[in-house]
Amino acid sequence: MPLLVLASGSPSRRELLGRLGLPFQHHSPDIDETSRAGETPRMLAERLSREKAQALAEYYSHHLIIGSDQVVSIDDDLLGKPGSIDRARQQLQRFSGRRIHFLTGVAVLDTRQHRCDTFVDLTSVDVRHLSSDEIEGYLAKEPAIDNAGGFYMEKLGTTLFEGVHTSDPSALIGLPMIALCRLLRDAGVNPLLE
């Protein structure tokens, strides 16, 4: 079995990948995550996932490198990680009572075969109507400024939701495990048989 490398420093992604019971390393890639002119949220999620995996190829020449990235859109606007409490507040105010879309890309780069396969999952989240006090309370307890959308699905973020529409619940946490398992099987790694 080829060795697995997760191209991410995210504890949530490491926890998700760890569920498969396969040994893996993790290494944070350094890439420019700026969107390009004319790039849709789906295109951006796919490109960033692929580029994260490719950024580590020179260090891991006989491996399967897993890259993943997530972007958020509302009204066809692409939103990144808030980066500050003020921007997180603005995003949550904008999301209140609305449906937002999370596009989570995953790439598996087989450096032995120089082949990279990708998939992008779409998860839609209905955010309930949020009062200013609730937004401030959330930001005080969980300032998720480094997470797409400004909240963590695996923590208090679920208190903000009316509903989640997805074919893969793990995608909202940051790594679409159903698609990843399919990509790994295509690359010759079946977690049930390893």
Image: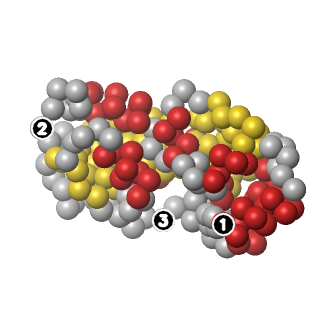
Residue 143 percent coordinates (x, y):
64, 67
Q: Amino acid at mark 1?
A: Lys
Residue at (18%, 56%) from the top-left corner? Answer: 60
Q: How far, Cα to Cα, is label 2 from label 3?
A: 31 Å
In the depicted structure, whether residue 46 falls above or below residue 131 = above
Residue at (38%, 62%) from the top-left corner? Answer: 9
Judged from the image, the secondary structure of the residue bearing numbered disc 3 is: loop
Residue 58 percent coordinates (x, y):
21, 60
Q: Amino acid at mark 2?
A: Met
Within 10 Å of disc 1 (Cα), the crowding (few <14, some 14-19, many 20+) is few
Q: Look at mark 3 in the image and give the residue it sits on.
A: 32
Q: Look at mark 1 in the image and give the residue it sits on.
A: 141
In the depicted structure, whether residue 27 falls above or below residue 160 = below
In contact (CB < 8 Å): disc 1 and disc 2? no
Depth check: give the residue in front, 174 or 70. Answer: 174
Image depth: mark 1 or mark 2 in front: 1
Q: Look at mark 2 in the image and give the residue it sits on.
A: 1
